[in-house]
Image: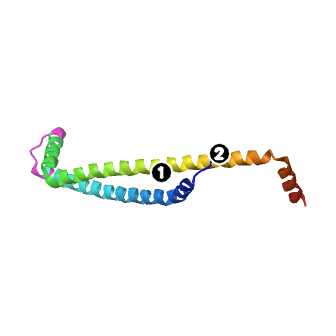
């Protein structure tokens, strides 16, 4: 089936759309890395404070104290929520990018099939083949 003009316009616009989505994904991943570093820093501060306090006899007690300290820290909780939102946005944008890529591939496949069908149709015309052949040989 011959691709419509809208499909051809869409095929021309898709690379720019995909690029824009990929730039958004890269920005979100950068934000995610920043928030992850901030979370690690907050956790390290709590770990340092817990080790200075002392009173914890084994690693399990220190680990439990760290979990409690992180849960009680409002900034840590806010950063964790932000990280979860970023992960969701990244998944959403990746799904959008994959959809755009599949759309582009589908339109291209349809266009290629149309081109092949037209070429096969033209090859059945012996007079046309003879005329093209004689010009190529001349």
Identify which residue, 104 or 117, lies in the foreground. 117
Query: Going by the image, does 24 lie left or right of 54?
Result: right
Q: Is residue 59 above or below residue 84?
A: above
Residue beneath the point at 33% across and 51% down: 89
Query: Going by the image, does 75 lie left or right of 122?
Result: left
Q: Position of residue 63 (x, y in %)?
A: 18, 42
Q: CA distance from mark 2 to mark 1?
A: 20 Å
Residue beneath the point at 10% across and 48% down: 54
Identify which residue, 8 or 80, lies in the foreground. 8
Query: Going by the image, does 24 lie left or right of 75?
Result: right
Element assignment for label 2: helix
Q: Position of residue 87 (x, y in %)?
A: 32, 49
Q: Considering the image in quadrants, where does the N terminus appear?
A: top right
Residue beneath the point at 30% across and 52% down: 86
The span shown in magenta is 51-60
Element assignment for label 1: helix
Identify which residue, 123 or 27, lies in the foreground. 123
Q: Earlier in the sequence, mark 2 or mark 1?
A: 1
Q: Position of residue 8 (x, y in %)?
A: 57, 56
Q: How many marks?
A: 2
Q: Residues within 10 Å of mark 2 (few under 14, many from 20)?
A: some
The image's colouring method is rainbow
Q: From this viewpoint, is residue 48 visible?
A: no
Residue beneath the point at 12% across and 40% down: 57
Q: Is residue 68 above or below residue 49?
A: above
Depth-wise, is mark 2 or mark 1 nearer the camera?
Answer: 2
Q: Is residue 128 magenta?
A: no
Give yes or no for contact between labels 2 and 1 (Cβ–Cβ under 8 Å).
no
Q: Residues within 10 Å of mark 1 (few under 14, many from 20)?
A: some
Q: Which residue is mark 2?
A: 113
Q: Which residue is mark 1?
A: 100
């Amino acid at each position: 089936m011959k691709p419509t003009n809208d499909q051809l316009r869409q095929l021309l616009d898709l690379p720019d759309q995909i690029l824009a989505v990929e730039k958004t994904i890269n920005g979100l991943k950068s934000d995610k890395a920043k928030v992850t570093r901030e979370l690690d820093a907050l956790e390290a501060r709590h770990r340092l404070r817990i080790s200075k306090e002392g009173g914890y006899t084994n690693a399990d007690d220190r680990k439990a104290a760290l979990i409690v300290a992180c849960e009680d820290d409002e900034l840590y909780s806010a950063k964790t929520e932000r990280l979860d939102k970023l992960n969701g946005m990244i998944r959403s944008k990746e799904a959008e990018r994959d959809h755009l890529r599949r759309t582009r591939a589908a339109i291209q496949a349809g266009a290629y099939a149309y081109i092949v069908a037209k070429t096969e149709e033209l090859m059945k015309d012996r007079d046309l083949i003879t005329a093209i052949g004689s010009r190529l040989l001349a």
